[in-house]
Amino acid sequence: MCNKRKECKDSGPCRLWTGWTVFLVLSLMMARVRGAWPAGQIEILGDLSGQLEASMHSSVLADLQEAPIASDAAIPAGFPDSSAIVGRLFQMRLPTKMADASSTLKVFSMTDNAVPCTVKSPVPLQIGDAKTDTSRPGVYVIDVTFPHGQAVKIREISFKNYYTAFLMVRLQKKDPGSPGGCARWVTCLKNHPLMSSPHTEEGSQDYFSIYRHQMLVDPDDVTSVRLILRQPSSAWLNFTLEDIRIHQCASDDSERDMPAWFSQLTPVDQVPDLQGLPNPQTVASSIQQMWALTEVMQTNQTAAPIGRFDSTLQTQDLQLAR
Amino acid sequence: MEEGAELSVVVSQVVQRLRGTHLHSHLEREAKECLHRPEIRIECLKEDVRNFLKKTGWERKLQNAVYRELHVLPQPSHAAAPPEHTKEPLAYMRKAQACWEKRILKSLNSMSTELGVPLARKRPVREQKELLQKWSEMGTNEPDLSHFRPVYAPKDFLEVLTSLRNPNLDSSDEASCRSHLGLIQVSLNVKDIPEMREFFCELSLEKGQLGIDDHTSFPPDLFESDHICLGKKVLSEQDSAAAQQYSRQGCPTGLRAHLWALILNCSNDPEDVMHYEQLKAGVINHDLLVDNLIYKDVKLTASNDDYYFVFEDYLYQVLLCFSRDTAVLEHFNYSSATPPTCHTKGQSGAEDGTSVYPPNGVVPFHGFSMYVAPLCFLYKEPSQLYSVFREMYVRYFFRLHSISSSPSGIVSLCLQFEKLLQVYLPQLFYHLRETGAQPLRIAFKWMVRAFSGYLATDQLLLLWDRILGYDSMEILAVLAAAVFAFRAENLMEVTSLAAAEAVLADLSTLKVMPLLQIFLFATVI
């Protein structure tokens, strides 16, 4: 839903009305599905002991063993290829028979369009011999490639920072114009500061996202992403980015399932002949407000305390948990 | 995130918090009742009701409530960030805080087993009656507290902070420009002097201040009477944000109680009185181990203080109720600390489970009662005193005894104090360090208590005006450095930690605002 809304906003007000109506209709459909759900038939069986790694040699496919988790104390100098965790496994049992024959079941993944990708280990760039030089490198380069050479339309790059001060992102795009379809590198983000001061801790372990609209070039048809990390301060022993994920834009296929009468909507450039009827824009906005109000009434959760006195100290035997 | 998306997240969070509160039900009731009024018309019902609420001051109350929520709302975090990251982003600080909490818990547990006192017990009926009769004079009780000792003192906490280390920091032996000469060895972002001058611009030399310009030698027309008029106007408007801005230049003594209640959005409504009465009933029904710690703390600190011993009874009435208030647990959402839990063993069919101990999650330490004592000068009603203290605790004081990277947290304050001293008074800093009297060892206890018990009360209240006005406790670090600057000549002659402590033992004659002004705006580096 959020993808659609953001896209509609990007393409200006002309598609706004259709976007909101789509939103409204889809949510009504979802509400119907929810309403017809027989209670207690979905069982979430919890996490399997494994994490989906993105790599050619994934240990998960071999024998579903838990990926080793690096401890805080030992920071590895570089990451092996297979350590990019991009998903988690869990099982969910769903009822096969639906009460209402016309409703459909759709399962949306929580990873929100994250594309499986291979994150290579950071390569240091420094002048002088890496092994004998006493000073540490101040630049690392991380390459992220997509399997099977697929070209991705990127919506967002998200990661967790670990003491990187500045980030530069370069994309390798497939050039549709040239006959061979050869790829070229473009810079889409220059010197983006992640830490407000390279010497101090602010922003050093925060989570960040780089969105499409922040990029200098549209990240369409991207075959490879190169992240260039810089940390000019010599105060830190190591710096890198963790948990790098590339999210792609929602595909346009879902719009093909729209009913036929959607295509008969009048485009906004042609002013419709109202003939005494109210303006469709105001109608749409007031319907949207009413829908929001009903949603709010349904999810009537409040965080305010009720005010009743909780007496949990009725028993004598209390023992502090370690 | 785009700005619009961030704003809508904040708005929905604030709405969720305010929905279901007393204010919400009052607003609904007012809106319903105003429908009977003749000036409300059906055609423009929404606008008319809104105007009515604005005229009768309800919109202002809602504004104040929203403003209060914005103060305590944590920063909107990234979708992938786990909740512990919102509480404290740095992993090593989370670990240090968890270790510290374990130590406190162990100490509390061992005290309970050694002395044979249960963590909580129900009072017998006779004892309940006695306590109810003596409620307003609990100071006359003389329980045997000789075996109880405080769970920890500020100097224990200082040892924990000095041993705080970032595993990713290059701490090789060679001295470089970034070596930390002081006790704190973490590189947090603290303001330097030009940034402080901008942040505390209302304290600058050309602006009037209460604490300086209300001295008897100045004619009141110069600043004081205008400021008092302005204060009365702010109070009549009942605007929280305006009161906060106003208190940056000090609050007049006569208006301070109302202004602070307005800034903190604490009213003395019947609902608040009822909440306080419920807590009082809880105190009477059950006895906690923590109560003995509170008794001991009040007897050791506030009762021995020349200014605060008269308020001993009030302190018991507030602090005992504070231990049982589960509303305080909400502040753990944005604090780096976690409340200690305990297992409850069921008796007579009750289920086993875990609950928070003490019920508000805060274990008092030596000097905790000094957070309440200065407020006793302002508020006479125990219920209002209680709600103002609770609000000040969940906004400011909790940061003074937990390990976090927040700019108002005690770690940042210590680092800021040391940096200010190194920049302004490098010779003094070096001399004190060489003689084994690290300045932070002396200044730490001032900052942990927010100077309560060290300054004269009128000066302390002027200082706390600025804490409320700037919504930050960085002023404590500045004042600590200013005190060192003031007594620099004497300190240069000391040769040991004990001598340095003797020079700085008595701060009760200091005037806070001139010190701050000179240190920030009139000292040449």
Image (tube, coloured by chain):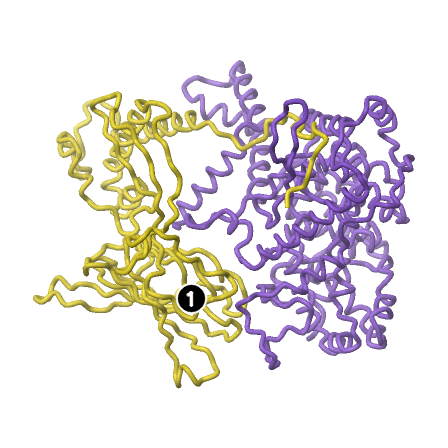
Chain colours: A yellow, B purple
Rendered view: A317 above or below B394: above
Rendered view: B502 above or below A63: below
Q: Nearer the viewer, residue A79 or A181?
A: A79
- Residue B472 in picture, x, y percent from top left: 64, 53
Element at label 1:
strand
Q: Residues within 10 Å of mark 1 (few under 14, many from 20)?
A: many
Identify the residue at image location x=58%, y=58%: B93
Asked if residue B234 can be seen in this view, the reply is no
Examine the image and state in which quarter residue A297 appears.
Answer: top left
* Residue that extends furthest to the left in the rendered view of this protein: A179
Amino acid carrying label 1: it is: Thr
Examine the image and state in which quarter residue A259 appears.
Answer: top left
- Residue B39 in picture, x, y percent from top left: 51, 18
Q: Quadrant of the C terminus of chain B?
A: bottom right
Q: Nearer the viewer, residue B109 or B79?
A: B109
Examine the image and state in which quarter residue B353 appears.
Answer: top right
Identify the residue at image location x=20%, y=58%: A151
Identify the residue at image location x=23%, y=41%: A14
Which residue is identified by label 1? A240
Rendered view: B15 above or below B34: below
Identify the residue at image location x=22%, y=59%: A147
The numbered mark 1 sits on a residue in which chain? A
- Residue A196 in picture, x, y percent from top left: 49, 64
